[in-house]
Every structure is written in structure tokens, then in C-alpha cells.
């Protein structure tokens, strides 16, 4: 079957790879390619974040964890590495449902929890270095026979192919008339200093993280819903540094080497559904918020199943 994937972020490229593995013919059409996609500036660590519906997200995340863990072992050039991190919370909560599906998980001792927090856990998860992962993913698609075409899509009914997979992220607001999808602005700081492990406060109102990569550590963050601004804001930089210093007091501000901003495609729920447009199947796969990488392979598997059913 001739499949056209619209969108060349991590969701689009993951879908393209899976469909090629299933024996389909695949063309990826987008107005932007790496390194100019939102995915390229993602932090990025596997962690279900700001996404729903819960049961589907858990299933997609578990599948993706397994695939990324495999890539960390078998494809070191992919830029996927396993790192330990600690999540801190201001109240005692139920342990996450995915705790038994990952390589390491344990509840923190009281002496391991920073001041201002009362609970937390340590976990081992894939860190995805997107400046390496995105080119690797495109190369994977190309090596299996996938093709790429740069074009702006304004009407899904005009896209060629037997079936269309819509992975346009924020672009769905105009392309699909979906006003439910909104930007969640994320600003980060790049630091030439390794914290050893990741530190996380994933609550939207106090979002904080340190994600160590092989080149830099990514500090965040912000989650400003409805904010389209791509400028680096000094007040956000200072707020991020203060939040991170509360979790990691050894942070050295003189080691800052850069900043970046990205707009997460936020939606009340991920839209992964098939419909018919102008007599042809279209599968929508967008609205992953801050968990695009975390859900990428699980969602790609579901897209492949929907294509098979069509």
C-alpha cells in the first residue's frame, strides 16, 4: 500500500519506519525537516508527561520504552542511552503504573529527597539525544526505501497515496481545524556540566529537570500553554536556574553554553484515530504534548495496525 506520512518530526519518522517494516511504500511529506522540527529541540527523556488518555498512553509508553532500550543496546549511533534519574514530589502519591515495566525503579530514602519535597523515586530510562537521533531515524527510513519530499500541505484530500498518516503536530490546528491543539512553550538551558543523574519535578506548575547527555546537560523547564513565543526570555532563564539549583545545588552558572525554545503540541488527549476524507483513509497521530518521543514507537505500532485494518 502507498502510504504518505505528513510531518517529519519524531512521530512521523517513527510511523514511516514501522510502515516500511510492514512492507508498505512510504513517502514523507513536510515543509520542515531535521534540524528544523520541534522534535529536534526536545530535551528528551522517556517519561509520560502531560498526556492522556491514561490507559492508551501507558500502553504506548511501555512499547516505546522497550524499543528505545533495545536501540541503546544495539544501535549506539542512534543517540539513545540509558540514564538514571530521580523524580521528586511535594506529596506522597501512588507509584506510577509503569514502574514494573522499566529496567530499574525504587522509592527514594528520606535522606535522598531535597528540602521542600517529601517523596520520590529513582528510575532508569532512555535519554534520547535528538540532534543524533533525528538524522539516524531519517537514515533508517531512507535505508528501507522511504522517500522524502519538501512541501507545505494545506489540504489532506490533495495528498497522494492510498492512505495518509497525519503527524503534523501543532499544524493540525489549521490543517484539521482542530482548535483543541495548542502550544505548550518549553524553554531550556544547555549546560557544560554533568549532574551524574537526572533530577525531575514533573508537576506542570513547578516543572524542573536536568537531563544529562553526552555533549551537554539540558535544564528546564517551562510549560506555558497557549504561548507561541520563540524568543529566549531572561526571566524564564532565571526561573529555570533557581528551580534547578533547588534540586542540584552544585550547578555552575558559568558553564551555561546556550538556550533553546520549542512549542510542544499540547492537546487534552492524543488524537490517534482513523477517518475517511474524500473517500480515502486518513490516520491522525498528533497532540502528544511533552511526550512525543515517549509515545513514538507505541503510537507508530498502532498506526501500522490501523493501516493493516484499512
Image (cartoon, grey):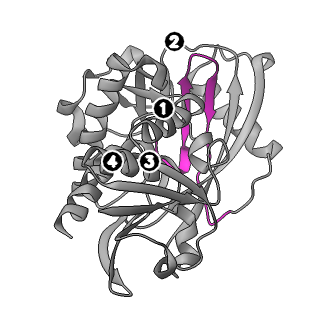
Q: Alpha-carbon distance for marks 4 and 2?
A: 38 Å
The residue range painted magenta reads 201-227
Q: Alpha-carbon distance for marks 2 and 1?
A: 13 Å
In-image side of 300 versus 221 (left or right)? left
Residue 243 image position (x, y, % from top left):
63, 34
- Extreme residue toward the bottom, this view: 278
* Foreground disc of the pair 1, 3: 3
Q: Is residue 93 visible?
A: no
Are the residues at dot 2 and dot 3 in contact (C-beta closer than 8 Å)? Answer: no
In-image side of 281 versus 201 (left or right)? left
Are the residues at dot 3 and dot 4 in contact (C-beta closer than 8 Å)? Answer: yes
Residue annotated with mark 1: 200
The image's mark for residue 99 is none
Q: Alpha-carbon distance for marks 2 and 3?
A: 39 Å
Q: Residues within 10 Å of mark 3 (few under 14, many from 20)?
A: many
* Mark sitting earlier along the chain (1/3): 3
The image's mark for residue 196 is 2
- Quarter of the image with the C terminus in it: bottom left
Q: Secondary structure at mark 4?
A: helix
Determine whether 19 is above or below 121 in the image: below
Residue annotated with mark 3: 146
Which corner quadrant of the image does residue 280 belong to?
A: bottom left
Q: Alpha-carbon distance for marks 1 and 3?
A: 37 Å
Residue at (28, 47) in percent of width and height: 298
* Foreground disc of the pair 2, 1: 2
Q: Secondary structure at mark 1?
A: strand
Name the one closer to the observer, 90 or 217.
217
Residue annotated with mark 4: 20
Amino acid at each position: 500500500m502507498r502510504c504518505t506520512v505528513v510531518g517529519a518530526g519524531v512521530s512521523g519518522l517513527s510511523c514511516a519506519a514501522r510502515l516500511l517494516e510492514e512492507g508498505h511504500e512510504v513517502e514523507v511529506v513536510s515543509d520542515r525537516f531535521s534540524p528544523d522540527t520541534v522534535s529536534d529541540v526536545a530535551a528528551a527523556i522517556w517519561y509520560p508527561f502531560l498526556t492522556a488518555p491514561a490507559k492508551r498512553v501507558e500502553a504506548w509508553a511501555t512499547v516505546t520504552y522497550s524499543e528505545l532500550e533495545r536501540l541503546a543496546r544495539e544501535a549506539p549511533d542512534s543517540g539513545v542511552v540509558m540514564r538514571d534519574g530521580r523524580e521528586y514530589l511535594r506529596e506522597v502519591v501512588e507509584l506510577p503504573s509503569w514502574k514494573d515495566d522499566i529496567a530499574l525503579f525504587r522509592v527514594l530514602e528520606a535522606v535522598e529527597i531535597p528540602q521542600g519535597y517529601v517523596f520520590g523515586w529513582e528510575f532508569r530510562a532512555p535519554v534520547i539525544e535528538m540532534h543524533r537521533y533525528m538524522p539516524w531515524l531519517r537514515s533508517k527510513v531512507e535505508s528501507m526505501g522511504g522517500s522524502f519530499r519538501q512541501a507545505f500541505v494545506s489540504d489532506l484530500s490533495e495528498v497522494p497515496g492510498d492512505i495518509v498518516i497525519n503527524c503534523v503536530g501543532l499544524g493540525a490546528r489549521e490543517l484539521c481545524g482542530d482548535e483543541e491543539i495548542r502550544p505548550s512553550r518549553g524553554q531550556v538551558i544547555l549546560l557544560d556540566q554533568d549532574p551524574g543523574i537526572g533530577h525531575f519535578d514533573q508537576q506542570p506548575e513547578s516543572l524542573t529537570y536536568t537531563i544529562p547527555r553526552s555533549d551537554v546537560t539540558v535544564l528546564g523547564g517551562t510549560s506555558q500553554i497557549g504561548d507561541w513565543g520563540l524568543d529566549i526570555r531572561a526571566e524564564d532563564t532565571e526561573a529555570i536556574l533557581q528551580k534547578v539549583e533547588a534540586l542540584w545545588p552544585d550547578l555552575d552558572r558559568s558553564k551555561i553554553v546556550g538556550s533553546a525554545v520549542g512549542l510542544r503540541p499540547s492537546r487534552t488527549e492524543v488524537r490517534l484515530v482513523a477517518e475517511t476524507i474524500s473517500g480515502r483513509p486518513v490516520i491522525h497521530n498528533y497532540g502528544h504534548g511533552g511526550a512525543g518521543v515517549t509515545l513514538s514507537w507505541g503510537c507508530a505500532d498502532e498506526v501500522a495496525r490501523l493501516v493493516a485494518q484499512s
